[in-house]
Amino acid sequence: MASEKRKYASQNKKAYHDYFVEETYEAGIELTGTEIKSIRAGGCNLKDCYCQIEDGEMWVIGMHISPYEHGNRFNPDPMRERRLLMHKREIMRLLGVVGKQGLTLVPLSLYYSGSRIKVELGLCRGKKLYDKRDTDAKKQAERDIERYEKGKEKWN
């Protein structure tokens, strides 16, 4: 699957700014028909969502999926908690890691896997303000070097 190019429905770019991503996991998500149609139409926002483990089940909280505009009156609540689908042993392992090490499970992206929609989860450690500044400075330096190299090629 690493060689295939994924088609993303939504990405949480803010998560990479706010957290160090230690590991990534793939999980299915339990959705209704109108939610799937809304995601395919681009109506999903992962900005401030996170995952929580309760009673051996994993839930994503704070994910906003807009109501499908051509749906009926039975459209679900846009901010409802949605269950994530993983093997029980994976969930229990993540529960142990999150509990002991103080890490957070954050949805990084929603993408299509065939006809299904999957969630990419990140096991994340929070960044301090100086870490964020350092990351931004490194990105800016890389951009400046790239611009310089690109401009240098034009004149040669």
Image: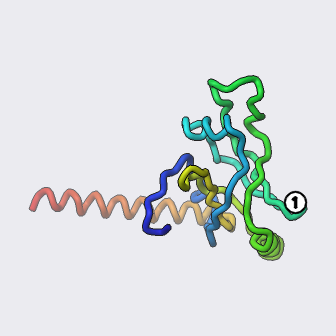
At a point 38% along the width and 64% down the height, the residue shown is 142
Front residue of this view, candidates 150 and 77? 77
At a point 83% along the width and 71% down the height, the residue shown is 99
Classify residue 15 by image quadrant. bottom right
The quadrant of the rendering that contains the C terminus is bottom left
- Say if residue 102 shows up in the picture: no
Looking at this view, name the residue that lies furthest to the right. 55
At a point 55% along the width and 35% down the height, the residue shown is 41
- Say if residue 62 shows up in the picture: yes
x and y percentages locating residue 102 in the rendered image: 78, 70
* Lateral position of residue 64 relative to residue 135, left or right: right
Q: Is residue 112 above or below residue 121?
A: above
Looking at this view, name the residue that lies furthest to the front. 115
Crowd rating for badge 1 (residues with CA inside 10 Å; few <14, some 14–19, many 20+): few
x and y percentages locating residue 59 in the rendered image: 79, 54
Query: Disc 1 designates what residue?
Result: 54
Front residue of this view, candidates 122 and 76? 76
Looking at this view, name the residue that lies furthest to the left. 156
Amino acid at circle 1: Glu
* Lateral position of residue 89 relative to residue 63, left or right: right
Front residue of this view, candidates 70 and 153? 70
x and y percentages locating residue 106 in the rendered image: 69, 58
